[in-house]
Amino acid sequence: MCESAKAHVDDLLVLLSKSKMLSILYIMNCDKEPMRFSMIKKRVNSSSTTVARRLGELEDHGLVTRTAFATVPATVMYELTEDAIALQPSLESMFEWVLNRADNAL
Amino acid sequence: MCESAKAHVDDLLVLLSKSKMLSILYIMNCDKEPMRFSMIKKRVNSSSTTVARRLGELEDHGLVTRTAFATVPATVMYELTEDAIALQPSLESMFEWVLNRADNAL
DNA sequence: GGAACAGGTTACAACATTGTTACAAAAAAA
DNA sequence: TTTTTTTGTAACAATGTTGTAACCTGTTCC
């Protein structure tokens, strides 16, 4: 593997390792439908600032599309791209492990 | 799900989201054999401090066992526990996605 | 007129994390 | 005798990240 590819790998791992990132990707797939900002924020239980930053980073990486509607008040829908959906089986299996482990810890 | 379980889930997600954590777990499974500190450090390309901190956190969570041998100089082997091995399929599939994406980005 | 709504942005202070450097131990090799 | 080796730890400065609070748009409701 060349240096350039390594940089891309690192970049993706850093992206995925940011706080709340795995949760955002996971919950966005559960409904399999475009989600509103407020709903994502509520489900991941984080500040607007952080959710907005994460969604921006996902959009920059082509993993999420953002669609704004000129309603009042504003409506914005976020949706996973095909590339992001390809990651979902791993995420589901990872969350299964996490949830299982959290249960056993009680 | 109760509050206590949520806390455990968050705890695990925070753990997995720490820098280099996914890489450490992934490379430790590739060889399927106990690995030395220096080898892990070399493979993940990080400072001793960070690698030591991560391995300590993994040990605290029961995902890695540490075995020290009284040789000179010191020899220490790290090994994934069964619990950590159960996470490997997800990790492998996630890294497959990451590597594939890094390739396509070239 | 003023409040309320969704979906943010900005600035900033507080907090968390990182790498660097120095250090350790104990025996063997130079 | 000095250096080398492995596997760390401690302290610290630099850097990165987070939440909070304030603010913004533009329309409808009271």
Image (cartoon, coloured by chain):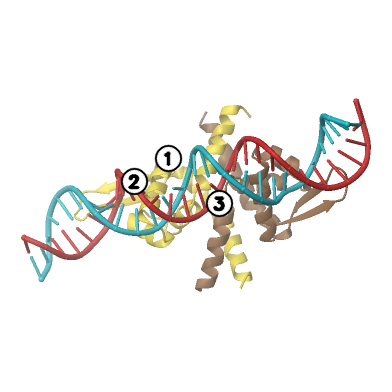
Chain colours: A yellow, B brown, C red, D cyan
Callout 1 crowding tier (Cα within 10 Å): few <14, some 14–19, many ≥20: some
Residue name at image x 38 percent, y 57 percent: A47
Q: Amino acid at mark 3?
A: Ser
**Chain at tag 2:** A
Question: Taking D1 as reference, is A16 above or below it?
Answer: below
In this orientation, which residue lies closer to the viewer: A69 or B23?
Answer: B23
Quadrant assignment, res B84: bottom right
**Mark 2 → mark 1, Cα distance in angstroms:** 10 Å
Q: Is residue B43 left or right of residue D25?
A: right
* Disc 2 secondary structure class: strand
Q: Are marks 1 and 3 on the same chain?
A: no
**Image spot of residue B1 (x, y percent):** 51, 72
The image's mark for residue A66 is: 2
Question: Taking B93 as reference, is C1 above or below it?
Answer: below
**Chain at tag 1:** A
Callout 3 crowding tier (Cα within 10 Å): few <14, some 14–19, many ≥20: many
**Image spot of residue A69 (x, y percent):** 24, 49
The image's mark for residue B17 is: 3
What residue is disc 1 on?
A: A62
Residue name at image x 63 percent, y 70 percent: A104
Quadrant assignment, res D20: bottom left
